């Protein structure tokens, strides 16, 4: 690992110089770069073919065709990540699972955390209304299935992995990331570097998440019932979703999966007198949401009514409405407050989990929020402004933070956002491979995702485990790196000591 001068990465960022202050360490690639032209000429077609033939593919908005797939963007080589920090976040994932489970079942904490947000953010307010409606009517199914993913950057100033966010709904790419892991093993083999393969950790993310759904199906205890995937109107990330379906069938040939969007559910879904969810004659045991996390997926009251019908039902939800609320940015900011973790974890556990957090700040009206607004206005490059949204492309960075806050600083509208310290990850080089574009050697940063599975009620946890990982890598010059949103590319982990 090559490092910059020590005064660049002291964590204070008082003198924000371009580039060097933004990211202050350069990691060595797993192989010396650039690779010889003749090596690239031979290996790139092999990598593309492997990706396509193993299903590392997508459909694209720009030229959607239901009869064809195109290669998902990926990086040619696995990207470096410190083994010590990888092992640490893997070990802590079951604690994160328990933390989110307990938060989701603590009504008082959810209410106190979100009471201001629901007054200014219509989407969160609609979710909250569903939650309170079901709570007042009486919960039909206390078992919830969490298929979580915690995302991290390795932080140069702190020399540790720091948490970006916790995803509790539609945590994607468990399937495609396993394909890219296999591709990187193949590529290193083709490059005559088998001695490097032990740096690539095994990745059973797809199998782990699907086994969680099967366990929930078994708890429901109705052999004829099916698993429902709630999907978008048009699914671009089709391979990732379908591989979940195929893996469920591989593990349990007797379990059937159906796919419906919220509009379809609104037309054909209904509850029986004993709250069983029926769709087109199928009793639903488990509902797996791959949609429902952003306002655009609720076109009308019909889609909101469909979501309420699902939440009223006896089906086991992944996530349940309380899990989705626990994953909001505002709740994540609240649990980063001093001593809040100790409400849900032991003192020693809280200390371990708390070390994962970077600075998170409330923008609620009042002196505390005023200080956070002033801090962000004075030095916007140090922060990220986050609304209560999932799916990528929603955060605000740099000079735009100041522009947004200028408009809302004196309004309750600012309570729909939180402020987070911007994490400074190291740069490394890799080859970006995208359809119809020349392969380029670029400077990148990587974001590690750790999957977790938890199944339980408010009183009992039946399953709690780490369930694989993923790596998304993006150009160091861009702010966000969602693959499905076209802002990043698939990658896998190369661990170094």
Image (cartoon, rainbow, N blue to C red):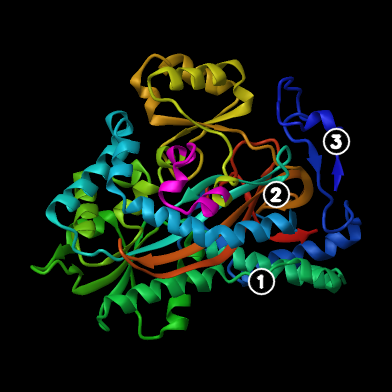
Q: Residue at x 69, y 47 (%)?
A: 160
Q: Disc 2 or 1, which lies upstream in sequence?
A: 1
* Front-lying residue, 154 or 10: 10
Q: CA distance from mark 1 to mark 3?
A: 32 Å
Q: Is residue 443 left or right of residue 295?
A: right
Query: Is 454 left, or right, of 38 in this rendering?
Result: left
The one of 169 and 95 positioned closer to us in this rendering: 95
Q: Residues within 10 Å of mark 3 (few under 14, many from 20)?
A: few
The quarter of the displayed image where residue 12 is located: top right
Quadrant where the C terminus sits is bottom right
Quadrant assignment, res 226: bottom left
Residue 497 or residue 314, whichever sits in front: 497
Q: Which residue is mark 3?
A: 4
Judged from the image, the secondary structure of the residue bearing numbered disc 1 is loop
Question: Could you classify mark 1 by the number of other residues whose Cα lies within 10 Å: few (under 14), some (14-19), or many (20 or more)?
Answer: few
Expressed as whole percent of the image width and height from the top left, the position of residue 176 reads 57, 64
| Residue ID for mark 2 | 437
Rounded to the nearest whole Å, what is the CA distance between mark 3 and mark 2?
32 Å
Dot 2: element: loop
Question: Which label sits on residue 367?
Answer: none
For label 1, the residue is: 202
* Residue 252 sits above or below residue 313 on the image: below
Q: Residue at x 12, y 54 (%)?
A: 137
Specify start and end residues of the magenta stretch as a single range. Answer: 333-351
* Tag 1 and tag 3, C-beta contact below 8 Å: no
On screen, residue 119 above or below 450: above
- Residue 285 at what x, y percent from top left? 27, 72
Q: Secondary structure at mark 3?
A: loop
What's the residue at 56%, 50% (across, down)?
151
Count of numbered badges drawn on the protein: 3
Inspect this view and state whether residue 291 appears. Answer: no
Label 2 or label 1, whichever lies nearer to me, is 1
């Amino acid at each position: 690992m090559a490092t910059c001068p020590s005064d660049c990465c002291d964590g204070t960022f008082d003198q924000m110089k371009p580039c060097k202050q933004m990211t202050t360490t350069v990691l060595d690639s797993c192989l010396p770069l650039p690779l010889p032209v003749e090596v690239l000429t031979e290996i790139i077609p092999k990598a593309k073919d492997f990706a396509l033939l193993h299903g590392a593919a997508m459909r694209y908005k720009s030229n959607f065709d239901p009869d064809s797939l195109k290669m998902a963007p990926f990086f040619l080589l696995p990207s470096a990540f410190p083994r010590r920090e990888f092992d640490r976040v893997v070990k802590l994932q079951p604690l994160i699972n328990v933390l989110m489970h307990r938060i989701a079942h603590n009504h008082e904490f959810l209410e106190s955390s979100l009471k201001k947000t629901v007054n200014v953010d219509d989407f969160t307010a609609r979710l909250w209304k569903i939650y309170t409606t079901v709570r007042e009517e009486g919960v039909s199914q206390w078992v919830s299935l969490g298929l979580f993913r915690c995302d991290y950057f390795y932080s140069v100033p702190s020399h540790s992995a720091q948490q970006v966010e916790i995803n509790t709904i539609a945590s994607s790419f468990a399937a495609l990331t396993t394909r890219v892991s296999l591709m990187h093993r193949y590529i290193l083999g083709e490059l005559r570097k088998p001695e490097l393969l032990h740096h690539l950790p095994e990745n059973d993310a797809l199998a782990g998440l699907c086994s969680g759904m099967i366990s929930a199906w078994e708890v429901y205890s109705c052999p004829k019932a099916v698993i429902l995937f709630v999907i978008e109107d048009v699914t671009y990330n089709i391979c990732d979703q379908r591989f979940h379906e195929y893996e469920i069938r591989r593990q349990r040939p007797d379990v059937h999966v159906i796919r419906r969007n919220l509009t379809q559910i609104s037309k054909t879904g209904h509850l029986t007198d004993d709250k069983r969810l029926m769709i087109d004659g199928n009793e639903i045991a488990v509902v797996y949401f791959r949609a429902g996390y952003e306002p655009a997926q609720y076109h009308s009251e019909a889609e909101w009514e469909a979501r309420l019908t699902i939440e009223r039902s006896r089906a086991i939800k992944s996530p349940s409405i309380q899990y989705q609320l626990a994953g909001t940015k505002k709740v994540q900011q609240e649990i980063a407050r001093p001593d809040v973790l100790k409400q849900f974890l032991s003192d020693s556990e809280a200390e371990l989990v708390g070390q994962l957090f970077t600075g998170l700040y409330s923008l609620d009206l009042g002196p505390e929020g005023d200080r956070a607004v002033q801090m962000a206005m004075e030095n916007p490059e140090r922060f990220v402004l986050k609304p209560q949204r999932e799916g990528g492309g929603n955060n605000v960075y740099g000079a735009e933070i100041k522009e947004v806050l200028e408009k809302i600083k004196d309004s309750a509208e600012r309570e729909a956002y939180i402020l987070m310290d911007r994490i400074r990850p190291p740069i490394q080089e890799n080859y970006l491979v995208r359809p119809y574009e020349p392969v380029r050697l670029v400077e990148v940063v990587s974001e590690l995702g750790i999957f977790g599975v938890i199944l339980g009620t408010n009183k009992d946890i039946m399953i709690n485990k780490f369930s694989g990982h993923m790596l998304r890598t993006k150009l160091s010059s861009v702010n966000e790196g969602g693959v499905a949103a076209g802002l990043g590319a698939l990658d896998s982990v190369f661990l170094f000591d």
